[in-house]
Amino acid sequence: MVYAAIVRRLIRRGVDRLNAGDPSALLGLAAPDVVLRFPGDNRWARMFRPVVKGRLPHDTHRGLDECRAFADAFVEQRIQFVIEDILVTGPPWRTRVAIRLHDFAVAGDGTDVYTNRAVAFLELRWGRLVVWEDYEDTERSAEWDSRRGAAAEV
């Protein structure tokens, strides 16, 4: 129970710092060989390799540098995350985390220009993030990309 509370607190702190423009707290949890899986066909999934659709998981980002580029893209677009729930289970050597959240970006006039809902599944080993798999409505992401045109290219 104490370990789960610590994991929840670290994730909330990391997301708060990400919302403030600093992804270092979340990236500080990551193992050097961390992988990110961002299913769907959108600019974030295509940052480093072509989209692969199938039954098996597809790593869209590998290692800290690629994950940092992913986080920096969210910071650049001023996307904000609101955590609704964090579920933590498993021992420290195989911890699984589910995060339910919503995310959004606001225009200068205060109107929402992007909104989405997501669930992220994380795997940690001894407190180090090794896998992050993100599920959200990728049609909303693609629609925002098309509205933004060439500016959507990373």
Image (spheres, rainbow, N blue to C red):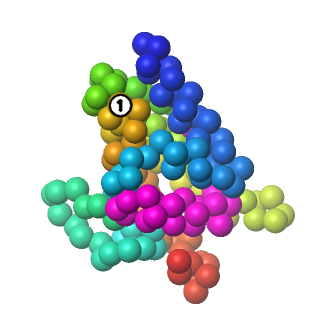
* Outermost residue, top side: 1
The secondary structure making up most of the magenta span is helix
What's the magenta region? Answer: 61-83
The quadrant where residue 109 appears: bottom right
* Residue 142 visible in the picture: yes
Q: Secondary structure at mark 1?
A: loop
* Outermost residue, right side: 109
Q: Is residue 62 magenta?
A: yes
Q: Amino acid at mark 1?
A: Trp
* Outermost residue, front side: 32
Name the residue that disc number 1 marks.
Answer: 126
Of the 4 image quadrants, the one containing the N terminus is: top left
* Outermost residue, left side: 55
Q: Going 58% across and 34% down the picture, which residue do you hit?
A: 12
Q: Going 81% across and 65% down the picture, which residue do you hit?
A: 108
Tell me residue 49's x, y (percent). Answer: 32, 75
Q: Is residue 9 above or below residue 151?
A: above
* Residue 133 visible in the picture: no
Q: Is residue 93 left or right of residue 68?
A: left
Q: Is residue 152 above or below residue 129?
A: below
The quadrant where residue 35 appears: bottom left
Q: Is residue 103 left or right of residue 65?
A: right
Q: Is residue 65 magenta?
A: yes
Tell me residue 8's x, y (percent). Answer: 51, 28
Residue nearest the viewer, comparing 120 with 15: 15
Q: Is residue 124 left or right of residue 57?
A: right
Tell me residue 77's x, y (percent). Answer: 65, 66
Q: Going 22% across and 56% down the picture, which residue do you hit?
A: 57
The quadrant where residue 104 appears: bottom right
